[in-house]
């Protein structure tokens, strides 16, 4: 008599193809899910970290660009102020610069066609905010040349005031060596040319006297450097 065989467990031979396919698909989904969770989850975390870092770096870049614009603005302002200071030094230098003062007068005289016959520097006098640098001048030329000379002095950078101007016809004795065209047309001019300089720090000048004693004038009445060359 044959002995019956008992089945233990589940054998793949007893499963249909559909069940096997379903188990395979489920296994693949499980593996794919684990792979995605482990790998892509880590990648996503890295991407978020990089995006955060990028945002931070972009903010720093924006700050740097703002700082650069402010720096360029300050640099341009510094250059403007330095140029203004250089221009101011030409208008009102720190010292008398007598050679430069005389050279300016001579150049203007030569350009205008007038003849600078003599010059004599005077004693400097200090005012409250500036010092006056005088020079006595004597020149001659035709009337339009003298007029051009005074106009030219008014066009130079440095402030130069022309004061105490006297004009007279050239003496007949001075005309003996002149051409007929020049005779009777020349005039002689004597004047006081005054340039100015700024006072150094701590250098005392004369204070303007006001009623009730010497007082510092209020800001609204503070005198500027005298007008002249401009």
Image (cartoon, grey):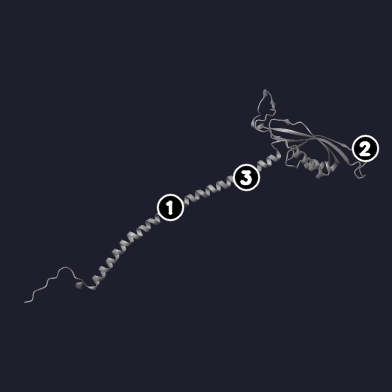
Which residue in the protein does label 2 denote? 173
Q: Earlier in the sequence, mark 3 or mark 2?
A: 3
Q: Does 202 sit above or below residue 56?
A: above
Q: Image quadrant of residue 131?
A: top right
**Lower position in the chain sequence, tag 3 or tag 1:** 1
**Residue 81's quadrant in the figure?**
top right
In this orientation, does residue 137 appear?
Answer: no
| Cβ–Cβ under 8 Å for marks 2 and 1 | no
Q: Secondary structure at mark 1?
A: helix
How much space separates mark 2 and mark 1, taking CA atoms? 95 Å
Q: Residue tagged by mark 3? A: 79
Q: Position of residue 8 (x, y in %)?
A: 15, 69
Q: Residue furthest top?
A: 212
Q: Tell me where residue 220 appears, x and y as whole percent.
A: 65, 32
What residue sits right under mark 1 in the picture?
Answer: 53
| Quarter containing the C terminus | top right
Residues at marks 3 and 1, CA–CA distance in whole angstroms: 38 Å
Element type where label 3 sits in the image: helix
Q: Nearer the viewer, residue 153 or 3?
A: 3
Return the residue found at the far front: 99
Q: Residue at x 67, y 23 (%)?
A: 213
């Amino acid at each position: 008599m044959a002995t019956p065989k008992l089945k233990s467990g589940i054998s793949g031979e007893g499963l249909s193809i559909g069940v096997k396919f379903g188990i395979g698909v489920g296994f693949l989904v499980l593996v794919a899910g684990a792979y995605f969770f482990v790998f892509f989850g880590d990648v996503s975390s890295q991407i978020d970290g990089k995006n955060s870092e990028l945002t931070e770096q972009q903010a720093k870049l924006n700050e740097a660009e703002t700082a650069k614009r402010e720096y360029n603005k300050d640099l341009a302002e510094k250059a403007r102020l330095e140029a203004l200071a250089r221009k101011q030094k030409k208008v009102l230098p720190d010292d008398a610069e007598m050679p430069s003062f005389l050279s300016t007068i001579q150049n203007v005289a030569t350009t205008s066609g007038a003849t600078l016959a003599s010059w004599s520097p005077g004693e400097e006098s200090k005012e409250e905010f500036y010092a006056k640098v005088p020079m006595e001048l004597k020149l001659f030329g035709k009337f339009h040349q003298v007029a051009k000379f005074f106009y030219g002095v008014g066009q130079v950078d440095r402030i130069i005031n022309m004061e105490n101007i006297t004009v007279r016809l050239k003496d007949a004795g001075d005309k003996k060596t002149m051409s007929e065209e020049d005779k009777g047309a020349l005039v002689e001019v004597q004047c006081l040319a005054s340039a100015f300089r700024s006072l150094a720090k701590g250098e005392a000048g004369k204070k303007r006297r006001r009623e009730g004693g010497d007082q510092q004038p209020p800001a609204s009445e503070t005198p500027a450097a005298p007008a002249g060359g401009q």
